[in-house]
Image (cartoon, coloured by chain):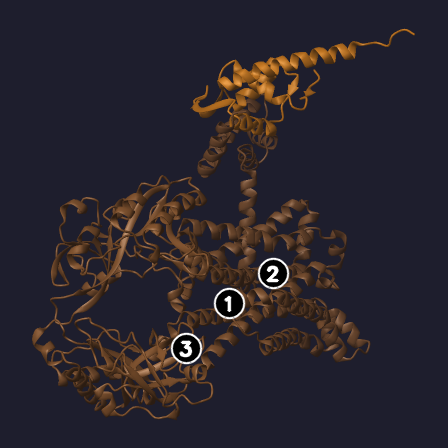
Chain colours: A brown, B orange
Amino acid sequence: MNLLARLRSSLRALLLGVRMRSEVAEEMEFHLAARVEELTRTGMSRADSIRHARAELGPVMRQQERYREAAGLRAFDEISGDLRFGLRTVWKQPVFTAVMVLSLALGIGATTAMFSLIYAVLLHPFPYADSDRIMNPVIVNEDNPQELRWFAMTKPQFEQFGRASSIESLLGFRNVNMEISGNELPEEVAAVYLTENADTFFRVPAYLGRGIQTTDAETHQRIVVLNYKFWRRHYNGDPTVVGRTLQLNHEDYTIVGVMPRRFAFNDTFGTSDIYLPRNLLHDSVRPLVQWPYTPWIKIKAGMSRATADAELGAIVHQFAKEFPARFPKKFHLQLQPIVVPYEQNTGAMLALLFAGVVLLLLIGCANCSILTLARGASRQHELAVRSAVGASRWRIVRQLLVESAVISFVGAALGVAASYWLAKLPLLLAPNAFPAESVIQVNAPILAFSVVLTLLTSILLGLSPALRLSRPDVSQMMQSSHRRIGGVRSSHAFHALIAGQIALTLLLMATASIAMGAFLHLMNAPLGYEPKNVMEVGVAMHFQDQKSWEGIKTREARAAYIERVRQSMAQVPGVLSIAVSMDSTPPYSGVERGFEIAGIPATEDQQARVHLVDPRYFATLQIPLLAGRYWSDAENTRGDGVAVINEAMAHRYWPNGDAIGKQLSIPSLKSDAPLVSASSYSSGTREIIGVVGDARNDGLERPALPAIYVPYTTLMAPYTQYLIKAQSEPLALIPAIRAAVQSVSADQPISNGYSDLKEAIERDAQWSRQRLFSVLFGVFSAIALMLALVGLFSVVSYSVAQRTNEFGVRMALGAQRSHVLWIALRTTAWSAGSGILLGLLVNQLLHGILVRWMRVHASNAAGLATVTLLLSLCALAACILPALRAASIRPVEALRYE
Amino acid sequence: MDQLELLQGTLDLLILKAVSLGPLHGYGVLLRLQQISGQTLTVQQGSLYPALYRLEHQGLLATEWGESENNRRAKYYQLTTAGRTRLEVETEKWNRMAGIMGAILKTEAEPA
């Protein structure tokens, strides 16, 4: 049979529904007229023949229905009938519907949000063409496989590398720090030089103008392409920027384009502000860069990574023979897809959150199933009537499924709308954990995902009630009218659902308690310093301007200038204390340098965090003095050979507590860079004059490393930083601080990068990850708890409503109220109780994985006990409240209750 | 004259045959069937139209609105190519079936 013709005819009938009906009517009219004419010819009266003809043909409506049936629209008509009925049913019970829709919207919204995050971060994070074939070649030290290293190449090496047969396209880049000159304040920018095949390698069209392109290799023009964020920051997103000049290191460059927001090359070394063609590298950077090419490789399609590893590994080993000093003794090359670092850092986190939202969705579904079942008991009468007048079981199942689909789709629409906002939440809470390129958006794969999810959900939540309710015992139902005794009590599936829902809720709550416990632990962990109301403010000195530079060129003059600025700042009302520090902002502070202890040959590679500070540093950050003294202002001005060490260092090298008076030296504490000035003592012998407490210097969680504090006048770059402790909110003082600085030197600005030390802590990766887990799992488990309680409450309410008669009988026969109460809630309480036990069991099984994935070190037994107790109490309350109503009914009323 | 009820499943074939002789409106199909059968067959009027719709939906009949003999708008049914093929196949099948049925029903008990 011609299927196409049938489809066409069905579609025509569907689309032209009204016209088809009128055509059928017209045809019937003609038939009747012809028939009447014939009948009157046989001698029948006109009225009789009309009646006769109508009776023969049957009602016109029936014929129209037949027509639609013949056109294959029967199923369609039935389903749209179900749909109308479903909508009506749903509409008639607003509270029930609202609870169902919300349960699903939360689950679907959260799941869609998490999926779009996973899509953006792990499945499709980069804007580059064929980004799955772009590899970061890393060198793995075989003596220490944890150590991965990038490597750079010379021009001949790079050319040789590019000829390898496994490479489709090879990009070389070199990161350089440059300075924007020509403005009143020099500004540092991160630049990256790219080989000129960047356009064909990335195939990312520029947002404005053009990107670096192959022809730039020949023209040798000074051009620059801007990063999107830099363009927004530095040019306020001015669209007319293309064609203007940007002065870098005192040379003029023409701006030819701006890259789109998602182009945030490169992830390995940090996103650059500007992109320059490779052939300009030697124009602006002195001394000559020997190794200008760090490679990114696009391997050929269909090439296995192992094959490419082998071929390229052989080439790199050959390089290692030429320059053994640049490579580990034993190593191999490994091509790492560029997404790998994020998979490692963020993958487990996302997997955990995804598991969390799926649990939430399951709880939402279970809740809907429970509600449907509980309500279904009261609908059994209706379904029995339908069944009695001939509805097939499939028809009833279909009707119930359509109803659940109506609810799911409304829930899904809300959920998807909410997901757009929800997906941004993790990015706000943990901005450093995600690739700069990832952009969260609702797109086709994500919408498809949520639609499939919704369909699955509606089947999942509708099926079990549908199958159960679609087999009503007609005779019993019809006889018993509304007075059904028992009702919900008998279903096993029902108890399984309640127990499962409670178990999942407990699991979520337990996870939240682990996350929150860890976060609290992190928040309350002693830092060894007090970040409250302290901010850092940087000041970069004018070394470009010859005249002002002359005044602060010598070490003494510069120290005096820094001190004058400090004193001027100290006059600002609200400032409690100000310290000078070069690079010593905790929780990551100091520079790792080797040191030697006088008289004791170094037995190991001795490293300590060297901090260049003034003596007020300790008071400002409230780092306690444990022994000895701080250096004086006079010693500070001279840059004397003194040192204060931290407890960790004292403990490690002078375990007997006799560090004071000992001598050490830091050989690398010197510099011949033109702008840096060092005191004569800088790398010489220093006497340890004091021991201070450990302040975190290697991140929030790791214990403090050995640290040496020396006067900042020892080694001075043309940049300094002030730590300012204020009475209250420190950033409010910035305008006053700025004015104070300018009162010393009119054209001396402060850096834009001032920040609160508390904020610096919040930007920390570990901090933001723990906060993310705590907030999200906290929210998840609160939602889950709410859903579960609504479920329990409605179950008990429904069962109480159905058994009111029974309770009346019992009480009339002398049952105690407490006994009735117990009967009303016992089955549900029993299910909830077994759910809690099940949840504890599952939690025990999963605990190890959870702790590892969250990178939490301490388990939280007290937290688990708390949430178990909380859930038990809430569940009990949700059962008792409706049950109390049953027990408080007067027997006479209960017996009359319909 | 005895009127015969239509055999189950034969209405489609009869309609195809009736229409094969020239385009007809619904009532015309009814009349022609009665006429060809010499008034011996009754077709339930209520079931005629569903059969027409079904055949139209299957692409065996094409429809067109036209003028009837007494100047009224009527819907005319006409055989499509697919319909003609179907009519031939079904006629062939019916003839074979009728032959077999006849032969079976003629069979008499063999003398022992």
* Label 1: chain letter: A
Q: Where in the figure is residue A237, as x and y percent of width and height?
A: 21, 61
The answer to whether B72 appears left or right of A633 in the picture is right
From the image, tell me which residue sits under label 2.
A366
CB contact under 8 Å: marks 2 and 1: no
Quadrant in which the C terminus of chain A appears: bottom right
Height in image: A523 above or below A241?
Answer: below
Distance from the alpha carbon under mark 2 to that under mark 3: 51 Å
Quadrant in which the N terminus of chain A appears: top right
Q: Residues within 10 Å of mark 2 (few under 14, many from 20)?
A: many
Q: Residue at x 74, y 69 (%)?
A: A805
Q: Residue at x 40, y 67 (%)?
A: A430
CB contact under 8 Å: marks 2 and 3: no
Q: Nearer the viewer, mark 2 or mark 3?
A: 3
Q: On the same chain: label 2 and label 3?
A: yes
Q: Amino acid at mark 2?
A: Ala
| Number of marks in the rendered image | 3
Mark 3 lies on a secondary structure that is loop
Q: Amino acid at mark 3?
A: Leu
Distance from the alpha carbon under mark 2 to that under mark 1: 27 Å
Q: Where in the figure is residue A240, as x and y percent of width and height?
A: 15, 57
Which label belongs to residue A854? 1
Identify the mark nearer the N-term, 2 or 1. 2
CB contact under 8 Å: marks 1 and 3: no
* Viewer-closest of A821 and A42: A821
* Label 3: chain letter: A
Q: Residue at x 61, y 16 (%)?
A: B90
Mark 1 lies on a secondary structure that is helix
Q: Amino acid at mark 1?
A: Met
